[in-house]
Image (cartoon, rainbow, N blue to C red):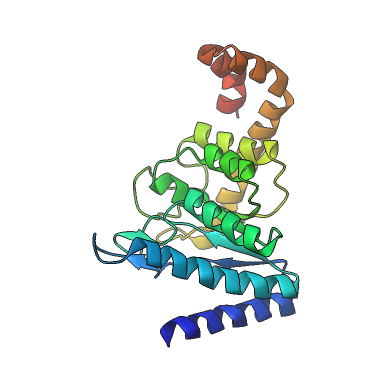
């Protein structure tokens, strides 16, 4: 049936990842979900996804691979995907890992997808870390809040929020790839990607500069002094 064939295709993907020497295989369940309220039984849908992920994770573990689940609220589904948020993906990943007795499944965080549902992306990083679920990949791009999956040039949205997100990855010890996930619909692709890399590097430099003064920032945070926190980082964020 369709479900069995889907699992077989994913299994073939794991084989390709292993053959290429990759350490991680990623799942983005874009067609798993619903378009209308009352369309599906949510409990059964979650259980099917969990059991499918458990089967794939077991196979991935045997191959020495990690499995990453990438969340997204919608598109192509018009209601919700089965993992509409990274928080949902992390909860299911944690359940699979408990069953397996090892951390095989993690999450792939797409920065633009976080903006689609208007969460603070840096909070998502720390919550995932708190839950003990590894981040196995990060996609970098830009999008407007509550918009669609725009995949725009990095750094063209809220710069403070992007720096906050990158700082969170530093604070939690993330040591994986930051992947440009960008569609240059009307821009010249090479120029647009080059600019994204430049703006990403600039934002990361600022995040590292804030991390260097983290003790002072934490002191201000501990006092609940919002203005002092902003005063400490303003020149870093707004300088060249």
User: Which residue is at a point 69% across and 58% down the rendered structure image?
Assistant: 103
Q: Is residue 131 above or below residue 101?
A: above
Q: Position of residue 42 (x, y in %)?
A: 35, 61
Q: Residue, x 68% and y 55% (percent of image)? A: 177
Examine the image and state in which quarter residue 151 appears. Answer: bottom left
Q: Quadrant of the N terminus?
A: bottom left
The residue positioned 56% from the left and 49% from the top of the image is 196
Is 221 drawn above or below residue 12 in the view shown? above
Total count of labels = 0
* Residue 203 % position (x, y): 60, 38
Using residue 26 as the reference point, say whether residue 33 is left or right of it: left
Left or right position of 131 against 89? right
* Vertical relation: 114 (above or below) 44: above
Q: Residue at x 60, y 21 (%)?
A: 233
* Quadrant occupied by the C terminus: top right
Corner quadrant of residue 193: bottom right
Task: Residue 88: give x, y in percent of width and height.
Answer: 48, 52
Q: Is residue 202 visible?
A: no
Can the viewer see residue 98 in this picture?
Answer: yes
Closer to the camera in the image, 191 or 227: 227
């Amino acid at each position: 049936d369709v479900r069995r064939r889907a699992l077989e295709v994913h299994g073939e993907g794991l084989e390709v990842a292993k053959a290429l020497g990759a350490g991680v295989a990623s799942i983005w369940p874009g067609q798993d979900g619903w378009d209308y309220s009352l369309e599906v039984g949510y409990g059964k849908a979650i259980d099917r996804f969990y059991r499918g992920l458990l089967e794939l994770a077991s196979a991935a573990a045997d191959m020495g691979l990690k499995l990453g689940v990438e969340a997204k609220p919608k598109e192509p589904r018009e209601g919700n995907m089965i993992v509409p948020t990274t928080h949902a993906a992390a909860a299911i990943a944690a359940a699979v890992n408990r069953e397996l007795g090892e951390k095989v499944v993690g999450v792939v965080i797409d920065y633009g997808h976080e903006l689609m549902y208007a969460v603070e992306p840096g909070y998502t990083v720390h919550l995932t870390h708190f839950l003990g679920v590894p981040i196995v990949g990060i996609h970098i791009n830009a999008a407007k809040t509550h918009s669609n999956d725009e995949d725009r040039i990095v750094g063209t949205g809220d710069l403070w929020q992007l720096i906050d997100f990158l700082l969170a990855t530093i604070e939690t010890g993330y040591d994986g790839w930051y992947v440009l996930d960008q569609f240059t619909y009307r821009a010249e692709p090479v120029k647009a990607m080059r600019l994204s890399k430049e703006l990403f590097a600039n934002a990361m430099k600022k995040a590292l500069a804030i991390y260097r003064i983290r003790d002072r920032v934490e002191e201000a945070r501990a006092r609940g002094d919002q203005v002092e926190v902003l005063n400490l980082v303003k020149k870093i964020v707004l300088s060249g």
